[in-house]
Image (cartoon, coloured by chain):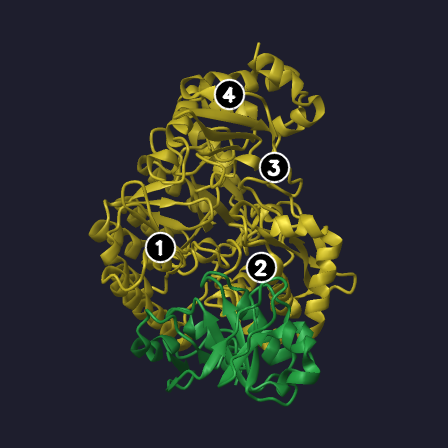
Chain colours: A yellow, B green
Amino acid sequence: MYVYDEHDRRIAAERVAQFRDQTERALAGELAEDEFLPLRLQNGLYVQRLAPMLRIAVPYGMLRSDQLRRLARITRDYDKGYAHFTTRQNVQLNWPALEDVPDILAELAEVEMHANQTSGNCIRNTTTDQFSGVQSDEIADPRPYCEIIRQWSTFHPEFAFLPRKFKVAVNASEKTDRAAIQVHDIGLQMVRNDAGELGFRVHVGGGLGRTPMVGPVIREFLPELDLLTYLEAVLRVYNRYGRRDNKFKARIKILVKALTPEAFAEKVEAEWAHIKDSPTRLTRDAIDRIQSYFTEPDYTATDNATDLLAKQRFENREFDQWLSHNVDTHKKPGYAIVTLTMKKTGTPPGDVTDRQLEQIAELADEFSFGEVRVTHQQNVVLADVRQDRLLELWQAVTPMGFGTANLNTLTDVICCPGGDYCALANAKSIPVAEAIQRRFDDLDYLYDLGNIDLNISGCMNACGHHHVGNIGVLGVDKKGEEFYQISLGGSSHHDAAIGKILGPSFARDDMPEVVAKIIDVYVDKRTEEETFLDTYRRVGIDPFKERVYA
Amino acid sequence: MPDVIFQDGSIQRDDWTVVPRPAEGESLKIPEQGKALIPADLWLAGYEHFAGNYSVGVWFDSHDEPEILEGKVNELPVIAVNFPKFSDGRGYSIARLLRERFGYENELRAIGDVLLDQLQFMKRCGFSAYALRPDKDIKKAVRCLNFFSQGYQAATDTDVPLFRRRAS
């Protein structure tokens, strides 16, 4: 994992001092509310329904155990003793006091953390696959490139006041896309060209929100050394020509669509031609240097523990289920990737207490070289667990509430904080997630249904990624009452698609039954091997419509 | 006359007048005395008349294209870029293009909604003078110009990004 050097530390310290100065001027009335707004947003600080909300960056989802412990302490000392894992691999505090934020930032800086650019119209935290570096089918570890992008985008002087927010995601696996890159402003798919050289396929203009779009490819192959100059060219074209007259038309996807992807790509290439060989062009040394932080830990096991696990599975059915659903194949024999689910029914998805943060830190130290990864599905991954210790780990996590064996099933819901916390929300989202989780509490039935992405957003801003849920739920406001619109058929993976709206919206109380009817249609219509998405794609939306609105 | 602050922190009385774009059908009203900044396209349209007159500079609005002055930038003593609203970031790109692409070497001035917390970004993008909005405390500008001792990126102020400095 990346470790700050003296340059990073100094920049982080200067940032804390700068934000302290800005906060003092804001509290003294020297900065008008609209002048302070983008400054605090670029520091992840929202003023929310009940209190300020502080979004802390977790660059590409990586956290060390000392950082988890510091987060736990901060939630205790400055907040109400819990934090929330977001749908963009970050962490949020829901109740900090405005005047405490500079002190919180100082505490974060001590453990090499920050809240830079976690909101505002700037380049946000770069996200990636939570299985980076430990899966067998990736082209290369994407995390060094994410760190290179993090450094390049941090306080970039030209791009601090873009038309709108800007999100970059990187994916390195050929078979899967856990980073949902095609619904990002820039999605970078790592590829090798015919000569075997490493590079990126560049998607630009994907996104969710009011106008969901799958990002078209604007360059099939970008050599790795050209990464930053090309990003700079894309951002410059966007900064100059993106719409600024209408907030809802200001994302880069609108510009790409208006110009057409081809014309947009031409503009980028023309700009890039000027800066391609500028000093911003990466060097082999620079990449090597960052890569040297992402070396393999000292793996000790050498063989798969196949016999032992078979025996343990046979003896314990619940362990067997957990292994089947929450544990993934590791590139190293003898190791496994474990996902701790933060989706226990009755707990808002992604919420953790200070004690739980410390428990996760302990698990990381004990089982996974002191590191964890946060996923955009709001779960936490222990990436390097010895297979012969899986049973021990499972026994430890179950009483903590992280052992629910529902990963990727219907009840592994992606859910924004919604109207319970967020000032932007039109409707609550957490109670809907909970009601659906209660309705589908039979694990065997969930396993029979297979992988289903259920994503819930409390408003059009789509923090719950509802457009790309196989089943998407969007909270809407109808004359002051909360209703929920359903869409079907979305996907955030390599086969990315935006879901189609089923029809008129429903009251909250009806939601579990409506979802149950949708599931019934799938169960009736599916062939043996089909996932929910397969069946939907084959039969279309009509059978679902007929059943739900019958 | 208000003050203007320069990138080295020095403060001077501002002797340039920004001449607004004339309304449709009206002509440009350049003051008889003193120095004037006029819309860049109008300077170009009156090039025969203005060339060589160092009491006249130009200004760009945030949606203007600095490309129109390519090859002529160094004939101007001052180029200003207007920030209609501080949150409109187009001026940063315009500044870098003027400096890094068109090789502009004289005074590059930020005008309009110029506040304190954007000054260092402006400096890094090549602005050398800042006409701070009059209600802002110019005494705090020096600190705001220098919050950070270094940046990660190459920009107009340095052509050595941090990743290249680390290597040396």
User: Which numbered disc, 3 or 1, marks the residue that appears first in the sequence?
Assistant: 1
- Same chain, labels 3 and 1: yes
User: Which numbered disc, 2 or 1, marks the residue that appears first in the sequence?
Assistant: 2
**Mark nearer the viewer, 2 or 3:** 3
Please name the amino acid that badge 4 sits on: Val
Q: Chain of mark 1?
A: A
Helix, strand or loop at mark 1: helix
- Same chain, labels 2 and 1: yes
Q: Residue at x 60, y 77 (%)?
A: B98
Please name the amino acid that badge 3 sits on: Ser
Residues tagged 2 and 1 counted as in contact (Cβ below 8 A) = no
Q: Which residue is mark 1?
A: A365
**Mark nearer the viewer, 4 or 2:** 4
Residues tagged 4 and 1 counted as in contact (Cβ below 8 A) = no
Tell me the tag on residue A515: 4
Helix, strand or loop at mark 2: loop
Coordinates of residue A538 in the picture (x, y in percent)? 71, 24
Q: CA distance from mark 3 to mark 1?
A: 35 Å
Helix, strand or loop at mark 4: helix
Q: Which residue is mark 2?
A: A141
- Horizontal side of A286 relative to B67 (left or right) equals left
Please name the amino acid that badge 2 sits on: Asp
Q: Chain of mark 4?
A: A
Q: CA distance from mark 4 to mark 2?
A: 38 Å
**Mark nearer the viewer, 3 or 1:** 3
Please name the amino acid that badge 1 sits on: Asp
User: Which numbered disc, 4 or 1, marks the residue that appears first in the sequence?
Assistant: 1
